[in-house]
């Protein structure tokens, strides 16, 4: 059974958590007082999205709402480092755009096959107790916990990458033309919205090829969501050439032509600047002069006007020649893009500084460093708690609290943990 076409989906992505460090001491026959030897935990795997030419829909993620890379394993005695978690590389179609779901912030685009984007970084492995030795702390009985991987909800949006986009009212003959030009064999019927998914085909000439996309859903007020509406208008933005089909046998072909142009303008005025061919279809049902009359009525036309019959094949050769001519001219005018084999990375936000907020009867501490300290150590361990207190002192926490009015006995909150301030 054919898989459904899916062009928008929300998922939760998470990098793997780092493995915990280890608390251990050397135990050797000739070294009764061996030093700390706890190894570091392995790093968590990161999560990537990669564009693949074998994918043309986002349906893989329809029933996979949580995507998580592998966790790192904990460290071991004798300085044994834990194993790092495997990265998770998820394949998506070229033309996939990734947004942060809550803020609608653009995280990145995967436009060409092979493009790869890091979306959720894995957490660092925790340090073993051997990393916390100092001249005054020669036998630390604590280790660092592994950091959690990045966690976020994202929206994947697919804009099909096609050279030519076929647009027009339902039943204007787009599917029939795509079949005639490329042999794509889309489902065709004589009722509105027979095409509910974009169909792709390939037109070849020697070693050259053009991809053609039949874009459904354009009716009056499509830009505002009417019919299939804005759901498919996004796919037009990625095309190089627009082929607007008009049913020349319809009662008002000029009005139909202008209505579609109006929808494009309302959605994005830049679409009207794309190279365009106006194709008067169903020539077999009217007199040939109807095309000339139509061309005069829409003058000045945004591009050449060609009469065809997608059903009988009449004048298709002329249309194909015009498509190749405009396509080659458009390709020559585009500036070559610099090659970039590097993996593109979503930049992590800058570290948030230490901040004290007084709220009711408590003082809330915010800042990446203090949050990391209380979450990456076992505060029930006296040695670990002593280390965390010393680190908080070194970053000036006590001075900031006292400046904010905090006094011994007051409640201090860091992340989801509460403490009594002792001064």
Image (tube, rainbow, N blue to C red):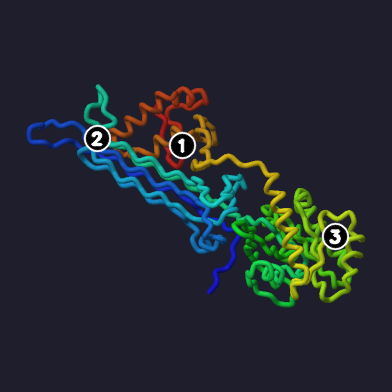
Give the residue displayed 31% in from the left and 34% down from the top.
Answer: 384
Q: For mark 2, give the secondary structure.
A: loop
Q: Quadrant of residue 279?
A: bottom right
Q: Are marks 2 and 1 in contact (CB under 8 Å)?
A: no
Rendered location of residue 245, percent (x, y): 78, 65
Can you tell which of label 2 and label 1 is closer to the viewer? Answer: 2
Rendered location of residue 400, percent (x, y): 49, 25
Left or right, residue 115 beside residue 335: left
Q: Which residue is mark 2?
A: 141
Give the residue displayed 52% in from the left and 33% down from the top.
Answer: 350
Q: Which residue is mark 3?
A: 258
Q: For mark 3, give the secondary structure.
A: helix
Comes first in the chain, label 2 or label 1: 2
Foreground residue among 174 and 290: 290
Q: For mark 1, give the secondary structure.
A: strand
Can you tell which of label 3 and label 2 is closer to the viewer? Answer: 3
Give the residue displayed 15% in from the left and 32% down from the top.
Answer: 34
Foreground residue among 159 and 422: 159
Comes first in the chain, label 3 or label 2: 2
Left or right, residue 326 beside residue 409: right
Distance CA(mark 3)–CA(mark 1) = 62 Å
């Amino acid at each position: 059974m054919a898989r459904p076409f899916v062009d928008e989906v929300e998922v939760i992505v998470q990098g793997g958590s780092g493995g915990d460090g280890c608390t251990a001491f050397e135990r050797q026959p000739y070294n009764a007082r061996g030093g700390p030897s706890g190894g570091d935990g392995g790093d968590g795997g990161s999560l990537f999205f990669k564009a693949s030419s074998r994918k043309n829909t986002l349906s893989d993620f329809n029933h996979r709402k949580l995507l998580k890379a592998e966790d790192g394993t904990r460290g071991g005695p004798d300085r044994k480092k834990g194993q790092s978690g495997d990265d998770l590389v998820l394949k998506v179609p070229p033309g996939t755009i990734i947004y942060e779901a809550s803020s609608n912030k653009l995280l990145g685009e995967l436009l060409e096959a092979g493009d790869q984007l890091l979306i959720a970084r894995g957490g660092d492995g925790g340090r073993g107790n051997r990393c916390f030795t100092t001249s005054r702390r020669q036998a630390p009985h604590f280790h660092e916990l592994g950091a959690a991987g990045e966690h976020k909800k994202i929206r994947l949006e697919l804009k099909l990458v096609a050279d030519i986009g076929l647009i027009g009212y339902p039943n204007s003959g787009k599917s029939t033309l795509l079949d005639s030009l490329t042999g794509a064999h889309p489902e065709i019927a004589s009722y509105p919205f027979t095409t509910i998914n974009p169909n792709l085909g390939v037109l070849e000439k020697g070693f050259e090829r053009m991809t053609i996309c039949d874009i459904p859903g354009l009716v009056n007020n499509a830009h505002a969501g009417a019919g299939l509406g804005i759901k498919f208008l996004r796919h037009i933005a990625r095309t190089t050439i627009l082929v607007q089909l008009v049913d020349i046998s319809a009662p008002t072909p000029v009005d139909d032509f202008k209505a579609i142009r109006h929808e494009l303008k309302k959605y994005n005025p830049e679409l009207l600047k794309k190279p365009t061919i106006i194709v008067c279809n169903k020539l077999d049902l009217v007199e040939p002069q109807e095309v000339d009359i139509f061309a005069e009525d829409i003058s000045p036309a945004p591009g050449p006007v060609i009469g065809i019959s997608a059903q009988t094949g009449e004048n298709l050769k002329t249309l194909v020649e015009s498509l190749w001519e405009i396509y080659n001219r458009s390709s020559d005018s585009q500036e070559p893009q610099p090659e970039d084999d590097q993996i593109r990375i979503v930049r992590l936000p800058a570290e948030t500084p230490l901040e004290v907020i007084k709220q009711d009867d408590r003082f809330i501490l915010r800042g990446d460093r203090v949050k990391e300290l209380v979450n990456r150590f076992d505060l029930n361990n006296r040695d670990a708690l002593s280390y965390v207190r010393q680190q908080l002192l070194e970053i000036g926490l006590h001075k900031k609290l006292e400046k904010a009015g905090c006094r011994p006995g007051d409640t201090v909150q860091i992340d989801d943990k509460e403490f009594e301030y002792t001064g």
